[in-house]
Image (tube, rainbow, N blue to C red):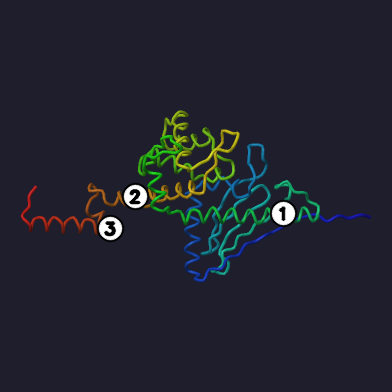
Amino acid sequence: MHHQLCFRQLELSDTRVFDRPATGRAWFEQTIRDQLTLGRPDRVAVVFGRRVTRQTPGRFHTRVINRGTEPAIQVHYRASKVKQYLKEGRALRTETTVNDTYDFGIGRLLTQANWDALLQVGHDINERLLDAQLDACGCAPDAAILERVVLPSTDDGQPAPGLRFGDPRVMALLASLCAFSHLLEGITNRSLRTLVAGLIPGYSARQMTYDLRRLRRKHLIERLPGTQRYTLTPDGRRLAVFFTKTYTRIVCPSLAELDPQLPDTIARRTPLGRPWRDFERALDVRIADAAITA
């Protein structure tokens, strides 16, 4: 009787220990926030390196779960999944579990070729998830790159209109670039336009063509040879994340707290509103003391 061994389940993990557990927990909780607000975490194809279509069987979603006070992230792809959590409060543990090798086009027989291929898949998934998370943390550009992006410039003699921070169309465009799906599937006029139109009603294909051109001339995206598809450059993803985080998490909340129409009783309960109102009143007193009238 002849028997052959097959893969039933394979788990590959990546463990990174923090020197200071409190710092590690703070980073992980911030990572969870980014997973839920940047890059559409429900699009898990970027993590698993596989293309998902309507005909692909299985479930595809991201969950953030809590057991007591310990949060964890689980990303499912067909029968397999990747899980991330803090182990013993100080080590970031990323685990990829493959329950069906066919999910990744690898045979089930226990051979050296299949074993090596599965190891590569598991390590690539872990690294891809960690890289995407780290990109969302270290995203601040230097002054030269920031100036090149926000101000009009030229690229190979062609005009490159500026991507002005705060412009509603620019902010919607850059927020849409944060989608995780772009990292695997690339960017097309239709795929990016659909996301931008969800933020700016009436956004047209003609506007998308113009915006793709200026994104390319600003070196945020580059065309894949022989196609009408683009891919994000490393600077492109970092800048998109930086602009989106700055606008949605710093500028907009701060302007709301500094709104002069905000009742004083409410403004004084906000972190920025209270010192700002005190500053305004102290300045008014200083102007009055100087006997200056408007």
Note whether 119 is above or below 163 in the view shown. Answer: below
Residue tagged 1: 118
Q: Nearer the viewer, mark 3 or mark 1?
A: 1
Local packing at callout 2 (Cα closer than 10 Å; few below 14, some 14-19, many 20+) is few
Q: Which residue is mark 3?
A: 269
Q: Amino acid at mark 3?
A: Arg
Q: Residues within 10 Å of mark 3 (few under 14, many from 20)?
A: few
Q: Residue at x 78, y 51 (%)?
A: 108
The location of residue 227, given as percent across then percent down, is: 59, 34
Q: Is residue 21 above or below residue 54?
A: below
Tell me which numbered mark, 1 or 2, is placed earlier along the sequence: 1
Per the rendering, the mark at residue 147 is none
Q: Nearer the viewer, residue 5 or 225?
A: 225
**In this picture, residue 192 sits left or right of residue 249:** right
Q: Amino acid at mark 2?
A: Val
Residue for badge 2: 251
Farthest residue toward the right? Answer: 1
- Could you give the CA–CA distance between mark 3 and mark 2, rounded to whole angstroms? 18 Å
Secondary structure at badge 1 equals helix
Left/right placement of residue 48 relative to residue 250 reads right
First reached walking from the N terminus: tag 3 or tag 1: 1
Foreground mark, 3 or 2, reads: 2
- Determine crowd level at label 1: few under 14, some 14-19, many 20+ residues with C-alpha closer than 10 A: many
